Image: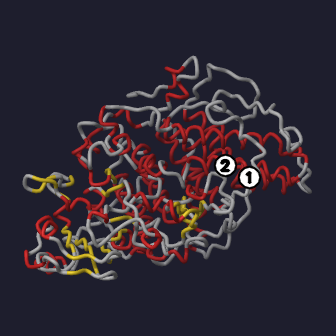
């Protein structure tokens, strides 16, 4: 969101102290603002509402770790080049060496946001709005955001401290509230209020949510509750999803719901800021980012392969950073299982594969094949000194299902560019990445299909010399295609799945993929979510919700190479030690396995 915020509030005392239920703002304030009088004008109340978004800026969708919190330690991603020791806590279930510190930023940011929301909800009646409807529409943002913060806290950590009001009372023995109680008392009621009072239509340019976002997250939250032993909210969630689907299929006249006719349109840069499929987008204006422009959306950097391991591609120039096809190496490598999900029953590739992943790159640096590289990458010795000019094809990855696969592999030794065969990197038999070639390192594994959903040429240049760039594009947090897959899951839970395949095939048909047949089950939905939503902040919660992380057989069958590290206790993330050491009943907040 456009966060041109005058930081007149402290957001309730910086994360850890919020979780202690402390929100003292007694410090001297030379600007003359204080928490008791700022809401006495509508302008002042707008400042409070703006502060509700601050937690998102600090620790959520645009930050360096949130993508790995929600997509890492799943079946879809491993560390770059699958190297052990590369952020094992995100990709190898901590490699039996657990740290409880890396969740600090997210934990504190979430509670900062909750503190701001509680202030907004408490003080809404102090502001002189013209009508009650105007007042409700404004505070609905706080209800939506507070529910969102708690949704992520609960799904990531399980039971947490539930604070539903602003208080100056400090306790060093906080209560840990069960997830279903937080859903019942805060998350679902908050989204309900937002559904009733947020305005209809697309969110504004600064990314504030509207009614369709509230319906979407209400449906998502209700679906999540079934893992906590209740079916009480399933019908309500199904109805919320159906409202969006009906609206989408009737032209969007009620809520503005829309799904692009082709999958390719969803992630085109021209459609980003005004993306019609997005139910909610997270967007920061670079002139208003209070934490520095280098902290704007850089999610593209998570997924780029190690291009600089070949001399025709370098990183470090302004042009290389701004290129759509990627610059700096990322930290998320697709697993064999993720790529295999795109292979259809008839042996062809789901069209979403080549629309979602970059598999070839042109040179951005003049290069001539060296004798060493010829040996590393299986080139004929005669290719030594063969030039690759800037702009020429430099690297190409081919899949066995590609139409040109056989001819490309047959000409591998003589092509001017580096040809990477899927089979050079991935072993289907062991469902793993090939780490060795002969007696040495497998250098092919530095090159793998790279997710393009977050790529952009639209960078804000804060400091060229230090390469501090921030993507000005919005981050699509939730979109209409997911609602169809949520509806499919509801149908399986409520009706045995009689209509579920129809919802799934709506998404597949839009993508140009082959229709699935038979009766869908939960695994059908989860696999389709992997294809459609990979890299979109959903996978950890998906596997957790349907119980696939509660039994190690799923991880062993999809990522057998990490089976030695997997522990069913790792369904939850560790509550940061910085917090548990601060309170008297810290052991109550230490999740199993940590």
Label 1 residue SS: helix
Local crowd size for mark 1, using a 10 Å CA cut-off: few (<14), some (14–19), many (≥20): many
386 relative position to 469: left or right: left
| Count of numbered marks | 2
Residues 564 and 253: in front is 564
Percent position of residue 531, x then y: 37, 62
Q: Quadrant of the C terminus?
A: top left
Label 2 residue SS: helix
Compared with residue 529, is residue 118 higher up or lower down, i.e. above or below? Answer: above
Q: Are marks 1 and 2 in contact (CB under 8 Å)?
A: yes
Local crowd size for mark 2, using a 10 Å CA cut-off: few (<14), some (14–19), many (≥20): many
- Per the rendering, the mark at residue 54 is 2
315 relative position to 180: left or right: left
Percent position of residue 242, x then y: 56, 61
370 relative position to 177: left or right: left
Residue picked out by circle 1:
50
Mark 1 and mark 2: Cα distance apart in space: 7 Å
Residues 569 and 448: in front is 448
Q: Quadrant of the N terminus?
A: bottom right
């Amino acid at each position: 969101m456009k966060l041109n915020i005058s930081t007149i509030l402290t957001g309730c005392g910086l994360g850890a102290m919020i979780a202690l239920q402390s929100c003292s703002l007694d410090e001297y304030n030379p600007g003359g603002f204080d928490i008791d009088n700022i809401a006495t004008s509508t302008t002042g109340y707008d400042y409070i509402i703006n502060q509700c978004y601050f937690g998102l800026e600090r620790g959520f969708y645009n930050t360096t770790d949130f993508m790995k919190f929600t997509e890492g330690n799943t079946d879809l991603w491993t560390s770059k080049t699958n190297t052990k020791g590369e952020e094992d806590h995100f990709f190898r279930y901590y490699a039996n060496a657990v740290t409880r510190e890396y969740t600090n930023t997210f934990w504190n940011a979430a509670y900062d946001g909750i503190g701001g929301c509680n202030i907004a909800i408490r003080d809404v009646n102090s502001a002189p709005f013209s009508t009650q409807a105007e007042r409700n529409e404004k505070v609905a943002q706080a209800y939506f955001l507070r529910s969102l913060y708690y949704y992520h806290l609960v799904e990531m950590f399980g039971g947490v401290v539930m604070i539903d009001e602003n208080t100056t009372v400090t306790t060093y023995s906080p209560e840990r509230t069960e997830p279903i109680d937080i859903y019942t008392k805060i998350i679902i009621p908050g989204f309900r209020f937002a559904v009733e009072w947020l305005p209809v239509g697309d969110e504004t340019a600064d990314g504030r949510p509207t009614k369709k976002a509230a319906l979407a997250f209400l449906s998502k939250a209700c679906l999540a509750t079934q893992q906590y032993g209740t079916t009480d909210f399933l019908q309500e969630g199904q109805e919320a999803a159906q409202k969006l689907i009906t609206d989408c299929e009737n032209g969007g006249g009620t809520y503005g719901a829309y799904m692009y006719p082709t999958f390719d349109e969803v992630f085109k840069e021209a459609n980003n800021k005004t993306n019609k499929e997005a139910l909610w987008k997270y967007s920061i204006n670079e002139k208003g980012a209070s934490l520095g422009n280098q902290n704007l959306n850089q999610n593209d950097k998570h997924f780029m392969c190690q291009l600089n391991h070949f001399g025709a591609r370098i990183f470090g120039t302004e042009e290389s950073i701004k290129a759509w096809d990627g610059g700096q190496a990322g930290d998320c490598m697709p697993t064999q299982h993720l790529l295999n999900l795109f292979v259809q029953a008839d042996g062809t590739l789901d069209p979403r594969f080549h629309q979602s992943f970059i598999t070839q790159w042109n040179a951005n640096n003049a290069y001539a094949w060296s004798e060493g590289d010829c040996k590393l990458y299986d080139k004929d010795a005669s290719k030594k000194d063969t030039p690759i000019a800037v702009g020429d094809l430099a690297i190409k990855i081919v899949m066995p299902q590609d139409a040109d696969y056989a001819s490309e592999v047959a000409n591998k030794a003589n092509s001017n560019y580096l040809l990477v065969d899927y089979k050079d990197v991935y072993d289907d038999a062991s469902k793993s990445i090939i780490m060795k070639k002969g007696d040495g390192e497998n250098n092919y594994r530095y090159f793998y299909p790279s997710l393009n959903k977050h790529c952009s040429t639209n960078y804000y240049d804060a400091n060229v010399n230090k390469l501090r760039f921030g993507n000005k594009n919005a981050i699509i947090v939730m979109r209409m295609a997911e609602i169809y897959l949520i509806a499919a899951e509801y149908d399986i839970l409520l009706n045995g799945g009689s209509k579920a395949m129809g919802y799934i095939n709506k998404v597949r048909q839009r993508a140009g993929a082959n229709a699935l047949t038979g009766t869908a089950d939960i695994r059908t939905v989860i696999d389709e979510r992997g294809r459609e939503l990979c890299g979109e902040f959903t996978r950890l919660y998906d596997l957790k919700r349907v119980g696939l992380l509660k039994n190690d057989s799923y991880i062993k069958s999809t990522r057998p190479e990490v089976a030695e590290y997997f522990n069913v206790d790792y369904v939850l993330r560790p509550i940061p030690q910085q917090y548990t050491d601060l309170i008297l009943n810290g052991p109550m907040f230490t999740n199993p396995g940590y």
